[in-house]
Every structure is written in structure tokens, then in C-alpha cells.
Amino acid sequence: MDGTIRLADYTPYPFTLERVTLRVRLAPRATRVSARLELAPQVDGAALVLDGEMLHLISVAIDGAPLGPNDYRVTPTGLTIHPAALPEGPFSLETDVEIAPEANTALEGLYMSNGMYCTQCEAEGFRKITYYPDRPDVMAPFRVRIEGDLPVLLSNGNPVASGPGWAEWDDPWPKPAYLFALVAGDLVAHSDSFTTQSGREVALNIYVRPGDEDRCAFAMEALKRSMRWDETEYGREYDLDLFNIVAVDDFNMGAMENKGLNIFNSKWVLASPETATDKDYERIEAIIAHEYFHNWTGNRITCRDWFQLCLKEGLTVFRDQCFTADLRLGPVKRIEDVMTLRARQFREDQGPLAHPPRPDHYKEINNFYTATVYEKGAELVGMLKRLVGDEGYRKALDLYFARHDGQACTIEDWLAVFEEATGRDLAQFKHWYTDAGTPRVTVSEDWADGRYTLTFEQSTPPTPGQPKKPPRHIPITVGLLSPNGEEIVSSTVLELTKTRESFTFEGLGAKPVASILRDFSAPVVLDRKVSTTERAFLLTHDTDPFNRWEAGRMLARECLMARATAGTAEPGYLEALGPVLADDDADPAFRALCLSLPGEDEIAQALFDAGQTPDPDAIHEARETLAKDLARAHEDRLAALYDAMAVPGPYQPDAGPAGQRSLRLAALGLLSRLDGGARAEALFASAHNMTESLGALSSLIAQGRAEAALATFRARWQGDRLVMDKWFMTQLALCPPETAPDLARKLADDPLFDWKNPNRFRALMGGLAANHAGFHRRDGAGYRFYADWLIRLDPVNPQTAARLSTAFETWRRLDPARQALARAALERILGQEGLSRDLAEMTGRLLG
Ligand code: PHE
Ligand code: ZN
């Protein structure tokens, strides 16, 4: 009994919940929640166990009759009603509780942000609002009455009635409590409407604080695009008369898919050219889509228990990735997604926090909203689609929606619809869900008598609790190119199922050049000795854009690994980039990606994979010098691109101009190493949009010449929370590493460092953690500073403190001196009295 929850222990709830009626009387210190639950017992003699935390119980009654003190028991985690006090048939339970939203700094349950009331219930926040079976497999229709002296009172579903100081809402779709939401405040709406494919008129509103209404237009357009896309691509239509989005400044995560009332971190709604970057616009569009898509994949079909989280998150991330790929540049989006996967999920898999996409135990579910559940979960859906083809995928999804609408499901249900719709056996594929770790695939080639053979071997390194793993079912997309660059075998999916397996291509005239793992067809590490010439060839000729980029990436990586370990750097990388830079037919966004060097953490990861101990300082040095060499080698071309990629006219956030700006800024970053920041200073002075302003500022910071620009920026934007987050984050992430911990300390003293606001806290800590060599500074100052702040935040907001502790997840790959310092910091956290369950679980796992 150490508080571990296990998948194997799942049992259905012994009651069904037919209907929920809530009355919420709002007051900052004493909100009264009256709940009526209509329940029907399913098992004889079962006690009624309800979750509840931080609730002050005022009364409890069954079928209108108050219960006596011996009929129930209240604990810090819930309310249990003895079987003897329960009728045999259906009954209603009425409870009255009092809660204090103003005192809720954890931002889970009902809390206040800038005078507005709002809720966050996923995963287990509803139990901080009322006593309830707070688990996703208990679903019910809700009727909610809100009373409070505020102009806007919102909940899920359709509005049924309202008057001064009250409003009533009805949500006809049975839902788990984690999708409940309530918002009340002085808000203004940016409104629009959408007609669904079958002709339903849906009113759309984005609610924001007065003053922000002119920053909602982009999010609204993104919402309408999402609604249309889900109809055309998945046949999914919206199912209420109203769809509301609310932006809040204090929010632990990105956004939340509450039924009919999505709540967003204002960072992922509000956008104007002056305040949001191209990347922000793209993310806003993706997150709006993600939350909207959850209406079917998450809400109409939900999860049986929290172990199944990737059922909704993996699928919904996959859907939002495809949406962005369709609306923007597909291949560029794929490369960006793989970069994120490697930076976050491969890193997670490599360290002490590795876990399967479907974990089988946890202590605090909030700690499992991870890159593995989300991003790797999405890769698994993508692999399934590759294996069964587009048509098979559509059939399987149609069956999923038809069969499971209104249910709370498992990964087994999900795989079963694929098996039944397509006739495929996915028993081996299931290991992707249940086993942690990134498989390594090594490849060797054989050429004789017109026969070309590829031999693959796979293995997956041990992860916590899983020392040995069976081989996986891995789709590997391969194409073959002739020596003069023609495609002779177009993309073919090879299915690897054994530890070692060969595939032969017959009847070839000359030894081909293989392009393997096209489009990154599986989330594996491909380990293959490839000559610099062959990589350079692929970088110029591969017809698969992902592998074209990947060839350059691998060249850069090998070069950096050699430089960071005083090995001999492969020559040829700088030269190989020439043709891409000169290829004016290639998309600017694609060329920008080819110009960006692997990050320091990626190099450390690769070195560790290769059996070496990465030295953060040497890696930083190697990357800096390679960037400078790259700039020198292509100075003229870069300067020409910098000029040619200027985008005239008013700012448009679309993929085309955004791609040009990204290439221009990539060139600027390199050129600044030669011109001392002259171009960046000029751009900073003249920029009219945040993309260029922040791009120029970033280059100046990296050159250590940003003092004046940072002051100007601060003076201009100090009243804007979202922009000031960028100011905190960027200077820390990009400053010279030896100065980072001291700068962090200085910024933490800035009066604008409002540490209880999660965005601001993340901006500062995330900025430091992103400064690889700075966070890992040899004297441990980065670790100490970071640990101090996690300790301080934990009692106030444990969820955010625990999430940020992942900065330490790579500590074991470092040298013994750094390991000792990191361990000391982690042990100091773990030794705190009254540490939250969230942070205790994380530090415990980190220390392993
Ligand atoms: N379910 C949200 C999403 O992925 C994420 C989230 C989890 C938000 C927990 C808040 C709390 O869209
Ligand atoms: Zn989600």
C-alpha cells in the first residue's frame, strides 16, 4: 500500500449514474455546491464510495432524508455511505459542500484567475468541487445552475434559461466528470457561427477579458477550419447548438476539451501580428483543432480509466498533426513533429522516466500527461495507418465511432476495431502500447548479381521495470534510388516482425542507394553506417522530403558528435548543404529546417546512445563553432537569402510567408556570427511583427549584444503578459551558458516575475532548462536554482512543479561530478517535508 494504482486492479463502478444536477452559488471564499446524483445499484450490498478532496461537507441526504452520523464516513479523500443506509433500488443522493476557489492556487477544481471563476477537472479535479465517483467510466448527463453576480455564467452543453445573476445549462450527452466545466466572469465574446454538413446551426464564441477581443479572429477561423476538416476527413459532425472557448491567464496546461466549453491557456488563443510569432499562430491553430477534435475522440468516446489516456490523446494528436499537414506544408510539418518527438519523447525513453504509452501503474496520474502518451501515442496511430492503408484506416475508424459512441474504452477495444475492419492480426503490434523504450534498428546491405538485400536487426534497450522486450512489429518504408538519382523502387512498406530479418529486391541494373525509414515510418533509432557521400547524395536527390532533411541532419549530428569529443570531424557537411541552399525550388520552410543545427540536448542524447559521456560545455562549443563555420562557408548565399526572403506588405500568418520568414531568420542567426549582429540590430529596429522582432532579438542575445534591445523590448511590452513570457524565456534559453544561472537569479528578482502564474514560471524555468550547458553548469548552480524554485512552487501548485522536474530526466547520462550535484538537488527536493504526491513520485522515479 504505497499509493500505487494498478491497471490490473480495475473493477467497474458498482452503481450507474443516471443524471447529475448541480447548483453552484459562487463566492470567492465560500462557494456552495449542491449536488443531486441519481444512482442505481448494480451490485448487491455495495457501499457507495465517492471521491472528494478539500470539501467542507454541510449535509448529505438520500431520497430527501438527511443521513445520520453513523450512516456515512468522511475521510480526506472521500465520502463513503454504508450499504445499510442505501435503498435496494435506484435512489438520489444529495450533498451540500462549501469550497474556497480564491484559496485554490493549484488550479485544479474551481479556482479564480484575475477575478474570474474557472474550472479544471481533468484528470481528477471534479472531486475538489463535489463528492462524486470521479472516474472516466462513470458517465452522466448534467444539468447545472450557476448563481453569481457576474455578467457571463457558462457551463457545458446548451443554455436553457437565465436571468440576472443566474444561468442554467443542460448537457444532454452523458460525460465523465473530467469534462465538466464552469466559467463565470466579466468577459466579452468574439462570436461567429458554423453550419454543419447536415445543416445544424452552431453558435461559436470565444470569451476573453475586455481588451483582448481583437486578438481572437485567428483562433475563430482555426475553429471553423477544424469543424469542416473533421466532417470531410472523418465524417464527424458537431453535436450541440453552441461551442464556447474561454481564454484564461492562469492554467497549468495548454488547453482542455470540456464538452462544449473548451478552456484555453490564453497563450494558445490570443494572437495579433505584433504579439504572436508565426510559430504561435501555427500552434494556436493546432491546439484549437486538437481540443475540437476531442469532441469525438475523447468526449463521445472516452477512456475507461486513466491508463488508457493515449486512447484519446494519441489519436487526437495524430488527428491534429494531419490537420496541420493538410492546411500547411505536409512534409515540413512531419519534420517538425519528428524533431519534437526526438527532443521530448526519445529523451524521456532514454532516462529514468521511461514508460509505455499505456502505463500499467502510477501514483499521480497528472504525471502521465507526457510526450510518450501524447506524441508517441500519435506515432502508434500513424503506424497503424501505414500498416492497414488509408482505406483500412477509414474503415477501422468508422467502426470505432459506430461501435463505441457513448462508451468508455480501452486500447484493446481500439486494436479490435482495426483487426475486425481489416482482418489483420495486431497481437504483436500491441507491444508498442505496453512496452516502453525506443527500438534500435540496425541495417546492413548486400549487393550481388542484380539482387539487393537489406538486413534489419532490432532490439529495445531496458527501461525501468522492463528489462527484456520481445521484437516489435515495425513498418519500415523504403525506396531505392539509382546512382544518378532516379527513383527505381518507390516507397514500399517492409514489415519487420523478427529480431533479424532480410528483404531482397531483384533485377536491378546497378547497386542502388537506399532511402530507409522514409517519412519516419516508425519511432525508432535507425543505426546505419552511411558514407558522407551517400548522405550528401540523399540530401540532394531523395524524393522523400523527410529523408532528404534527415540526411543533412545526420551529417550535422555526426560532425557535432566528432567535434564534441575531440574526434575527427567528418568533412563534407558544410559542402553538402550547398545544393539545398541553392535549390530555389525547395520550399523556404524546408530549407530553413535544413539549415538548423541539431540542438545541444539532441547531441548529448546521440553521444549517450553511442556509449559516451556527453560533456555539455564541449557540445556547446562544438555547436557554436560549427554554426560559425557554416556561416563562413556560405556567407554570400546566406546574405542573398536574407535579402531575398524579406516579405513585403502586411503580415500574414500563412505557411507561405511564414516559411520565408523562417528561412530569413535562420540565415540571420548564422550571419550574426559574422557581422557582429549588425543585421539583427537593424531588423530589431524596423520589425513590425513579433516573429521578426523576436527573431532579431534572439540573434542579438546569442551574440551577447542584446542589452539595449532587451530593455527596449521590456519597456514596450511590460504590460503584456504573453509577450513578457517570451522576454523571460528567450534571454535565458539563448544567453551564453556560463551566465545562465546568474541571469536566472536576477530575473527571478524582477518585479514582473509573478511566480504563481504557470506561464511566467515556465518561461523562467523552461528558459533555463532549455539552455543546456547553462542548466548543467559544472558548479551545479543551475540545479540548485531550479531545485529551490521547485521546492517553493510545490505547496502552491504541485502539478506544475512536478511537470517541470523533468528538466532533471537526463542527469544519469552525465559525468560523475555533475551526477553528484544533480542527485544532491533531487534528494534535497525529496527530503522536503509535506512534499506533494506529484513531485514525490517524480523525484522518486528520477532518482530511480
Ligand atoms: N486533455 C488536455 C488536452 O490534451 C490536456 C490537459 C490535461 C489539460 C490535464 C488540463 C489538465 O487537450
Ligand atoms: Zn488532448
Image: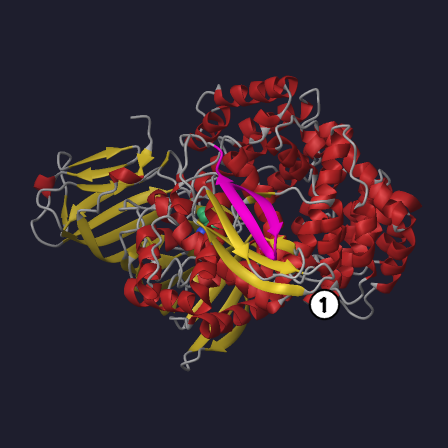
Residue that label 1 marks: 656
Identify the image quadrant of residue 70: top left
Q: Amino acid at mark 1?
A: Gly
- The chief SS type of the magenta part is strand
Q: Is residue 247 above or below residue 709?
A: below
The magenta span reads: 440-461
Q: Is residue 740 left or right of residue 68?
A: right
Residue 451 included in the magenta stretch of the image: yes
Q: Position of residue 514 (x, y in %)?
A: 63, 54
Residue drawn at 69 percent across, 50 percent down: 551
Q: Position of residue 279 (x, y in %)?
A: 67, 56
Q: Nearer the viewer, residue 88 or 185?
A: 88
Q: Position of residue 504 (x, y in %)?
A: 53, 54
Q: Position of residue 752 (x, y in %)?
A: 68, 40
Q: Is residue 660 left or right of residue 782?
A: right
Q: Is residue 535 above or below residue 401?
A: above
User: What coloring was used for the rendering?
Assistant: secondary structure
Residue drawn at 66 percent across, 56 percent down: 512
Q: Is residue 835 above or below residue 23?
A: above
Residue 628 included in the magenta stretch of the image: no
Q: Is residue 783 left or right of residue 291?
A: right
Residue drawn at 73 percent across, 47 percent down: 718
